Image (cartoon, helix red, strand yellow):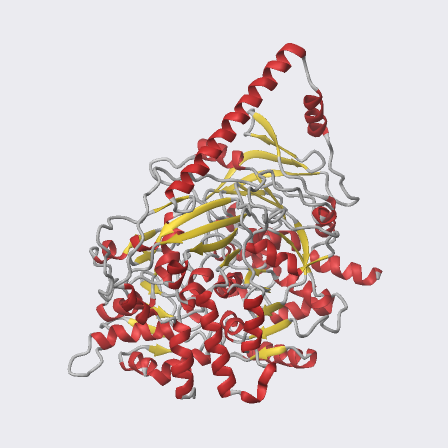
Amino acid sequence: MITPVRRSLALAARRGSRLTLAAASRTARATRTTPQAARIASYTTTSRLDAFHTQLENAASSPFPSASKTAVQNPQTLTEKIVQRYAVGLAPGKKVRAGDYVTLQPGHLMTHDNSWPVAMKFMSVGASKIHDNRQVVMTLDHDVQNKSETNLKKYRQIEEFAKKQGVDFYPAGRGIGHQIMVEEGYAWPGTLAVASDSHSNMYGGVGCLGTPVVRTDAMSIWVTGRTWWQIPPIAKVTFTGILPPGVTGKDVIVALCGLFNNDDVLNHAIEFTGSEETMRSIPIDDRLAIANMTTEWGALSGLFPIDAMLQSWLRAKATTSAMLNPELGARGKFTHSKIDELISNPLTADPGATYAKSLYLNLSTLSPFVSGPNSVKVATPLKDLEARDIKINKAYLVSCTNSRASDIAAAAKVFRDAAKDGAVPKVADGVKFYLAAASQLEQAAAEESGDWQVLLQAGAEPLPSGCGPCIGLGKGLLEPGEVGISASNRNFKGRMGSTEAKAYLASPEVVAASALQGKIAGPGWYQKPEGVEKVIIGEGNGDHIQDKALSIEDALDKIIAQADGMIATAEKEMFGATGTDATAAAEEEALTEVLPGFPEKVEGEIVFCDADNINTDGIYPGKYTYQDNVSVDKMAEVCMENYDKAFGSIARAGDILVSGFNFGCGSSREQAATAILAKKIPLVVAGSFGNIFSRNSINNALMGVEVPRLVQRLRETFGSKDGEKVLTRRTGWKFVWDVRRSKVVVTEGEGGETWSQKVGELPPNVQEIIAKGGLEKWVKSQISEA
């Protein structure tokens, strides 16, 4: 049991507190900004770069000289600065930049239920001792309700392996791995931590650069302490105004996912920023929720600044640790001396740092939002859904996103406010309300406050601390035809149960109010600021004058570029081909080295899955993810079944699978790639890929290439007729990928048009990994050659 001193010193400070901040914000003056006329959104693709080559080059200096005498040469973003600290093997004086391939030595790596599959890979390459056991953390959190002998045996194997290797281990029921990483101080501000799970982004809520890796990467880190990473393009998201009463961090990220829903930040690293007043309105627990769900927004990280709000949270943790565990002294994970050091060497983005894009959201104009059904790209103001009288069957206050003590307190307040004569009201008839804390520590804090007991009295059914329903495992899954509302992070079709169910996402208080009323509803806490009529978002920083200046600069750049183009065209017409033209022609004919044993061409008939955002749950169902004995034949059988049950009978060995944009978004499961290989499909083509799927593909020897034009042509040719869309179809089109020439050739059916276009190069070092059969076999070959 957590003592009252923890309650008074830690819990309130940790919350920030949502309820006290809401009260304070009633008197705060909200900042209002002018909406921009339009927001431009488009799909973009990035060609693969030569892996690791940038480690041997000097970074180019900024083309925009600063007027300040103290300007930083080659300014870096906060993300780049943290990567700089953890990149190894850089050339002297090299400053890392977005787009660089680097070798990373992360501060910490967390693996969870997938620790045993990682251990199997580890042992299969001939390794016996983890390179740095202080770097590794193991938690059991995903399938904790599964008491089968098979699962319990796996859990014992993981615990025994962890003990043998001397790594920090947290057993089933202790908490969700990401929450443990934060509350135990592994995710420390200004550091870099990774995990073999897609929601590693959550560490950004405490100023730690968190990004996901996959099982094979985890094995590589266990063996060598290192893995590879390409620094993503970096997007800056500026918050203005302050959160109104009744609006939470969950509403912020649900709105961002739904309002900027054209892959605006796909495969980007995000840095959140804002004025001190603005950032003080976002408590740490809310920051963790926002950072956590930047995964669903399509980003690879979601980094908050190391600011006064975070420092207060850290101080509360350090004070609590010193009072409850004085024997730890300087060995404690949270100490005031450690915080003093952090503050004395502040890590911030340099003025003039380059961002791939800038977006803004005026928090003062935000109201409670709900995501879904079955898509985070659909976000609707709560008041609009309340008017539709949408009945629910199940409600969930679970997951690492929103089941900390402050979230449980908000849910309990909903029932307390509705109490009559001191009696806690019950959950609506016909509704099941499931409750699981993010960790034992968070549950203990909620029990101490009485919040946990209030929800149990209302009829909530407690579950052990773990992922459970969020990942589609254990008790309480959605049945066909049911409607559920959850405070978790992902509502993909079939994610939380049946593919024929509907899942919505919302804040803990909206989930609780919905459970109480039996329909999607809110607690009535929202206080609309005067004059607010719509959510104000846009491109830029939210500063109208500054954004206008930047727009003028962009316009001038475009005019200059157009003028340069006109001059070049005139010179060509008057004087013939120039040296520049000759260089371009030479580049057009430049050939990529193809390693022995790697195919120069990959070809086959196109089978088209016409959808964007096909996620890893759609490719490989979550219910099989933590079954380690699934055969190759079974993997082939269930491949794509959550997307289209007919896929298995339509697709054939040797086909080229083509899909839309953001293919493979979602979780980090490697089986999304290996299931496609099990189906004997050698190549996936898409308008764009989720980064973690691309990483899994390379690591498991599945080839992939981005060709947006092909997706467009297929949709123009085979578009839905009479409103009916064919999910999977054989096209009769032939696709050829010429690896040596970095070119694809498409023949649009018998006697149809043939066209070609250049694509990103597949460099020899990536070929080598694929040719070896994946990163695991590559590492094994390196060990054997050593």
Query: Which residue extends farthest top?
Result: 574
Query: Which residue extends farthest left?
Result: 421
Q: State the residue at coordinates (71%, 26%).
A: 583
Q: Nearer the viewer, residue 467 or 450?
A: 450
Q: State the residue at coordinates (21%, 55%).
A: 388
Residue 398 visible in the displayed image: yes
Q: Position of residue 753 (x, y in %)?
A: 55, 25
- Judge left or right: residue 561 versus residue 737: left
The answer to whether residue 582 is above or below residue 303 is above
Q: Position of residue 55 (x, y in %)?
A: 72, 50
The answer to whether residue 57 is above or below residue 363 is above
Query: Which residue extends farthest front?
Result: 69
- Judge left or right: residue 75 versus residue 484: right
Residue 436 visible in the displayed image: no
Q: Nearer the viewer, residue 44 or 770?
A: 44
Q: Position of residue 519 (x, y in %)?
A: 24, 64
Q: Quadrant of residue 457?
A: bottom left
Q: Quadrant of the C terminus?
A: bottom right
Q: State the residue at coordinates (24%, 75%).
A: 415
Q: Quadrant of the N terminus?
A: bottom left
